[in-house]
Amino acid sequence: MMNKHEHLLEIQKVQFALVDLNLFLDTHPESEGAKKDFAALSSELKRLIWDYEKKYGPLTNFGSAYFQNPDAWINSPWPWENEKGGKR
Amino acid sequence: MLRGKDQKKEYKDEFKDIKEELEDLMDEFKNKKNYKDNMMVSCKSSKGTCSQGKKSNCLEDCLNDPAKYSCNVFCKDTDENCYESYKLFNPPIYAKAHIQVQPYKNFFNLDDAIIAGTIFKDLYDPYCNSGYVGGKRSYDE
């Protein structure tokens, strides 16, 4: 079971891999392996974000976040409440 | 202030200067045009151009000896140019880059990728040992 920080880190790892795959696909759009991995990681990222937002509140505020847990919105630390390197 | 004869002489001298300058420019232009015309030969009739041999041979020749005449000739029909005669292509080509196709293989795991800054080990390895990512032993090695 991941804690909040580990969960966030996991999202960052998958997001990073997706950014790199995105760059690769810009120059190799025909690569079947890269397309397959991109699709798989995209689903993985959606699942991770969904789980995170359900537990800890929204990651973004652009209308796409899970909004059935409004308590978590105000319980999350404000940016100025974060310690250096992120609150754990 | 100049008046009468003096002013006329002044205008005349000025005109002479402008005329000489224009003549120089015209000569320069003619030289450039002649050069281009000479180079813009019909390559089919020109000795030593690519159209006389196979284009694949030509590429090899030009890679070995880029200074060869046939590698620098400017044909009216650019298809007749040697592959490497980029110096005189029309429209001009200022540079060429060769980028090797990156293979989709040899990946970091997700934990190491975010530290290494790439998912591809081959992009990291020329600079750092991919067995040690971020100064720590990699999960895979």
Image (cartoon, helix red, strand yellow):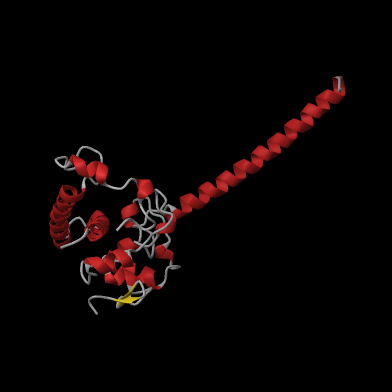
Residue B46, picture quadrant: bottom left
**x%, y% of residue A36?**
13, 59
**x%, y% of residue A33?**
14, 62
Can I make out residue A69 in this image?
yes
Q: In the picture, which quadrant includes the C terminus of chain B?
A: bottom left
Of the pair B23 and A83, the residue shown nearer to us: A83
Q: In the picture, which quadrant includes the N terminus of chain B?
A: top right
**x%, y% of residue B104?**
21, 66
Residue A62, picture quadrant: top left
Of the pair B55 and B101, the residue shown nearer to us: B101
Q: In the displayed orientation, state which residue is furthest to the top.
A: B4
Can I make out residue B102 in this image?
no
Q: Would you place residue B1 above or below residue B39 in this image?
A: above
Q: In the displayed orientation, state which residue is furthest to the bottom.
A: B141
Query: In the rendered picture of this protein, how many numbered marks are placed on residues?
Result: 0
Instruction: Give left or right: position of B6 versus B104.
Output: right
Q: Would you place residue B85 above or below residue B121 in this image?
A: above
Residue beneath the point at 21% across and 60% down: A3
Residue A38, picture quadrant: bottom left
Of the pair A3 and B135, the residue shown nearer to us: A3
**x%, y% of residue A12?**
26, 57
Instruction: Give left or right: position of A33 versus A16.
Output: left
